[in-house]
Image (tube, grey):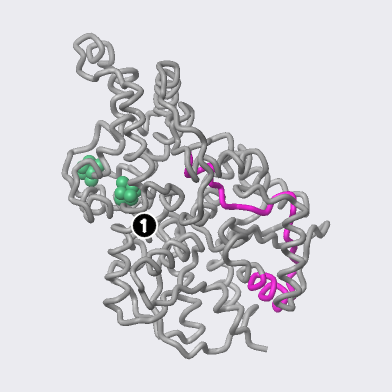
Amino acid sequence: MNAEAKPPQPPARAPDVAEVATAMRGFVSDFGPTAALALESCVHCGRCAEACQFYVQTGEAKYTPIHKIEPFKQAYEREVSPFAFAYRWFGLAPKVTGPELQSWQEMVYDSCNMCGRCSLICPMGIDIADLVEQARHGMFEAGLAPADYLGALAEKEHLTGSPFGLTITKFQDMLHAIGIEHGVVMHVDEARADIVPTVSSIDLKTYPASMAAIAKILNHMGASWTFRTDGFDADNVSLTAGDRQGQRTTTMGIVNAAIACGATTLLMPECGHSFTEMRWEAANEMGHALPFSVLQITEFLAEAITDGRIRVNKAQQKATYHDACQVSRRGGATAAPRVILKALGVDLHELEDAGDANWCCGGGGGVALINRAAPLRAKAFEIKQRQVEATGMETVFTSCSGCRQTLEHGGKATQWSTTVASLLELVADNLAS
Ligand code: SF4
Ligand code: SF4
């Protein structure tokens, strides 16, 4: 998931009429009563624009949230609205063309990290981030997801269950090697276990110590737990690419793996989108409530620290904390990391807009996986950089490896001396005996 890595490059191609028709069907099929109501209730107050980092940092009107759902709106007015016939008859909503759809890639993918900040601020309760996600479905169905890293990774995830095509054997080898390197016992494919931790592709590729940290903590607690090789990579790149089928396949692979060993808790890693997918969408995919609880790792740690299952030493340091949008604002785990930091005795210097109003790192929603979006990503990162510097802290903790990587890349490009660190690993390094 390293946006600076040399990406696979599928051949570029222009959309044709059939693709446009498919895209239109995709858009229109996503229109439920809620979406239609949302579009009709916009009062054009402009508040969402001021909430969006891409508009705030560039000043370009095309990056306002409401503009990003233009494909959606056109499809609605022309194909579904009560006045669709009139729109078509008088040409009020022009037919969407192939080149137009292709240009909308920038609006729907490159300049939206699905952070939901606009959704939070909208006085009419319009969830633009969700509308963008639905617009991506139509784009993906038309073959118009960005073909470079994001699209290619989603395709591989769909085929193999892992965006990097990590096979079960390779995952087993990796866990074995991590266990030896960190001196920690790895539980793998146990027939029965209470807790099933999952991992993110970014951890697998860049931060393998996080898997050792999970194992160390669960062993320390004496928990019944196991990694499952039949469902381990929770990243769900398909979700951000707009591939609904791939999204479902990835999710159900993990759900079925947890069910197979009778898990009561599914632990989501330091990863944003994997958490919201499992917390809010998995039950819909399954058709009924999940037979286990879904906890983001910070929620699990905060609960375990609070009820005494984990005891920690004081870390003796001061730092700031970056909230991942999907963990806090969209996921609801805003208090948990602060409970952990407090227990560790970290002198926390909060960022301006910390918590639910936090700004995205700049790379969420798959933006980190679109190479041509690098300049936009860098602009978005500037907000975070300014806010961290204003705290005077030299360390910023986070609970999302995607954010961690984006902040590290942004810092590297600007010779930033700030250290970006994992909250999970901080806990593992400070377990009390
Ligand atoms: S904040 Fe809501 S009502 Fe205001 S312009 Fe944006 S979408 Fe429309
Ligand atoms: S979800 Fe975030 S990035 Fe996307 S339009 Fe809204 S504020 Fe902007």
Q: Nearer the viewer, residue 49 or 165?
A: 165
Residue 136 at x, y percent in the picture: 42, 36
Q: Mark 1, residues whose alpha carbon is within 10 Å: few (<14), some, or many (≥20)?
A: many
Does 285 sit above or below residue 307?
above
Residue positioned 64% across, 73% down in the render:
213
Magenta span covers which residues? 212-241
Tell me if I can see residue 178 in this picture.
yes
* Quadrant hosting ligand 1: top left
Res 265 quadrant in image:
bottom right
Does 225 sit left or right of 414 as displayed? right
In the image, residue 224 lies at what x, y percent? 76, 67
**Left or right: 263 in relation to 333:** right
Q: Residue at x 35, y 33 (%)?
A: 35
Q: Residue 324 appears in which quarter of the rendering?
A: bottom left
**Percent position of residue 219, x then y:** 73, 75
Residue tagged 1: 362
